[in-house]
Image (cartoon, grey):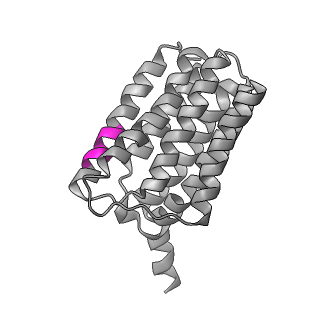
């Protein structure tokens, strides 16, 4: 088990990954969907607040970075003309889940429910990016996902109290980022299409 202060190193690594994606967004290399990146900012920041309320402590910094980086990229996307707002029915569902998480948390005062609904909202919001990473990996940069995965891995290695509030969001981020990183870096979808032909 690592000292809890290693979470700061993980946050810095994640921040570096976020900056690289932000620069690629400004340059036009990435084409982020603003709806997805908005929800990717909102859901972790809800979970971060709930984690603080549940006494998670320094480990919650990982969850904060999981929301802060997307917030930076959302703002940067307004510089990139190829970024877009594309609202469909599912975007309303994802947004509703995020709002529901806040309402449930405030009504019940139960942070674990807010964390659970934040994971669900973030996960549903991730589906378009997972599909895009599979079909068009060239429209994504892999570093942000690699560094977020490292950040989550470090956070998991520092946990002393294995409660839902402590491990759930880092574990979710680790798995999601490992998937997207692999799809973008190794171009699995493109390779599979080439093998099918």
Q: Name the residue rendered at 62%, 34% in the picture.
A: 169
Say which of 91 and 126 sits in front.
91
Above or below residue 109? Residue 171 is below
Residue 21 among magenta residues: yes
Q: Identify the residue at image location x=35%, y=64%.
A: 138
- In the rendering, at what x and y percent does residue 130 appear? 52, 59
Q: Residue furthest right?
A: 108
Left or right relative to 31: residue 149: right
Q: Residue at x 48, y 13 (%)?
A: 5
Residue 194 placement (x, y as % from top left): 45, 80
- Relative to 169, residue 184 above or below: below
Where in the figure is residue 113, as x and y percent of width and height? 74, 33
Depth check, front residue: 26 or 154: 26
Residue found farthest to the left: 27
Spot occupied by residue 129 in the image (x, y as percentages of width and height): 49, 59
Is residue 22 placed above or below 84 in the rendered structure? above
Q: Is residue 8 left or right of residue 127?
A: left
Q: Is residue 85 above or below residue 26?
A: below
Residue 62 covered by magenta stretch? no
Q: Quadrant of the N terminus?
A: top right
Which residue is depicted at the point 50% across and 23% down? 61
Does residue 150 appear in this view? Answer: no
Q: Main secondary structure of the magenta part?
A: helix
Tally the marks.
0
Q: Quadrant of residue 10?
A: top left
Using the rendered image of the protein, determine whether residue 88 is visible from the camera's viewpoint.
Answer: yes
Q: Report the span colored magenta.
A: 17-23
């Amino acid at each position: 088990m690592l000292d809890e202060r290693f979470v700061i190193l993980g946050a810095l690594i994640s921040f570096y990954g976020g900056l690289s994606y932000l620069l690629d967004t400004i340059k036009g290399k990435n084409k982020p969907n603003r709806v997805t990146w908005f929800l990717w900012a909102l859901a972790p920041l809800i979970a971060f607040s709930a984690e603080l309320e549940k006494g998670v402590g320094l480990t919650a910094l990982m969850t904060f970075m999981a929301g802060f980086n997307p917030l930076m990229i959302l703002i940067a996307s307004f510089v990139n003309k190829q970024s877009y707002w594309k609202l469909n029915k599912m975007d309303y569902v994802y947004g509703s889940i995020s709002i529901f998480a806040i309402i449930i948390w405030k009504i019940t005062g139960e942070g674990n429910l807010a964390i659970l609904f934040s994971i669900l909202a973030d996960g549903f919001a991730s589906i378009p990016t997972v599909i895009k990473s599979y079909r068009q990996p060239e429209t994504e940069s892999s570093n942000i996902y690699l560094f977020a995965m490292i950040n989550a891995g470090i956070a998991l290695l520092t946990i002393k109290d294995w409660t839902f509030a402590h491990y759930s969001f880092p574990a979710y981020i680790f798995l999601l980022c490992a998937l997207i990183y692999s799809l973008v870096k190794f171009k699995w979808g493109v390779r599979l299409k080439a093998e099918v032909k």
